[in-house]
Image: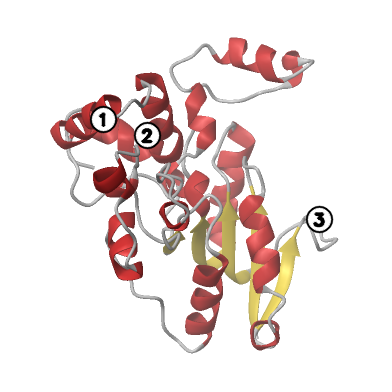
């Protein structure tokens, strides 16, 4: 039986719900035992485990030291969710005065210690597998757990949400209806949920990192603006769900 730990950093906890859901399947609980999970298990300190799932981004020194200690105790580390992989919506504060942000959010900001920047887990430690999403697709997590138990891993497929729309036979909301959609620049994995309801993708799985550069991203942003999407909203979505990749692209290189 594999020993599992779940570590939560800065996030909304949406991915935590999907982790809990995954452990309701009998074939999974028969192969995995949760050793550390502060939301479920009353254990003060994490010991050695086979797998650790880390959810959320790193916002302060304590969290940074925590993930380093976790890496040393785990045989296999999985970064869960767009926050852990790319920074997440906390990244919207990057570039602003962090003290102004704290005043806007907290009643007593003097007690809050956070970086002005936001660090994805993948920037601080080596991770062995990533599952993006905001929140993650529960099926992707159960697939990972089942395949890992049999000695394998899911195959990484590098594609955009557009590929999922094509497989489902969905009309392209961007081309056919002129609806602003981030599907062409967003990592697949959600099953094209939003386009299936006639609305545009808003990029919650993060910016795809395999074939984008600044020129392509700026051209795409101009097209969204032509369709009526506010420039500030475009920048916020690209930055908020894919800060790590967005920053690399806007520095002039490929992600």
Quarter of the image holding residue 33? bottom right
Q: Residue at x 68, y 12 (%)?
A: 103
Q: In this rendering, would 39 be left or right of 254?
A: right
- Across and down, in percent, residue 134 comes to 53, 49
Q: Residue at x 50, y 48 (%)?
A: 84
Asked whether the beta carbons under mark 1 and mark 3 sit within 8 Å of each other, the answer is no
Which residue, given by chain and number where applicable, does mark 1 sit on? 221
Asked whether the beta carbons under mark 2 and mark 1 sit within 8 Å of each other, the answer is yes
Which residue, given by chain and number where applicable, does mark 2 sit on? 238
Camera sees residue 83: yes
Above or below, 31 against 24 in this view is below
Number of the front mark, 2 or 3: 2
Quarter of the image holding residue 254? top left
- The dot on residue 130 is none
Above or below, 29 against 225 in this view is below
Quadrant (top left/top right/bottom left/bottom right) for the C terminus: top left
Number of the front mark, 1 or 3: 1
- Across and down, in percent, residue 82 comes to 48, 48
Q: Residue at x 35, y 53 (%)?
A: 187
Which residue, given by chain and number where applicable, does mark 3 sit on? 44
Instruction: Specify few, some or many for label 1: CA neighbours under 10 Å numbering under 14, 14-19, or 20 or more.
Output: many
């Amino acid at each position: 039986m594999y020993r599992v730990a779940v570590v939560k950093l800065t996030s909304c906890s949406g991915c935590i719900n999907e982790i809990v859901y995954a452990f309701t399947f009998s074939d999974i609980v028969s192969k995995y035992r949760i050793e550390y999970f502060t939301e479920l298990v009353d254990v003060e300190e994490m010991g050695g485990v086979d797998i650790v799932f880390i959810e959320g981004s790193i916002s302060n020194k304590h969290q940074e030291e925590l993930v380093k200690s976790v890496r040393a105790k785990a045989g296999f580390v999985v970064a869960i969710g767009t926050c852990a992989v790319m920074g997440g919506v906390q990244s919207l504060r990057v570039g602003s005065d962090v003290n102004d942000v704290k005043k806007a959010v907290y009643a007593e900001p003097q007690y809050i210690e956070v970086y002005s920047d936001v660090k994805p887990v993948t920037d601080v430690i080596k991770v062995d597998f990533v599952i993006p999403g905001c929140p993650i697709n529960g099926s992707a997590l159960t697939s990972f757990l089942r395949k890992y138990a049999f000695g394998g891993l899911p195959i990484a497929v590098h594609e955009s949400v557009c590929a999922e729309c094509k497989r489902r036979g969905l009309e392209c909301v961007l081309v056919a209806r002129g609806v602003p959609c981030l599907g062409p620049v967003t990592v697949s994995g959600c099953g094209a949920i939003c386009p299936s309801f006639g609305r545009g993708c808003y990029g919650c799985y993060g910016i795809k990192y395999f074939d984008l550069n600044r020129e392509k991203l700026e051209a795409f942003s101009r097209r969204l603006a032509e369709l009526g999407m506010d420039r500030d909203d475009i920048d916020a979505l690209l930055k908020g769900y894919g800060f790590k990749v967005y920053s690399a692209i806007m520095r002039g290189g490929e992600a």
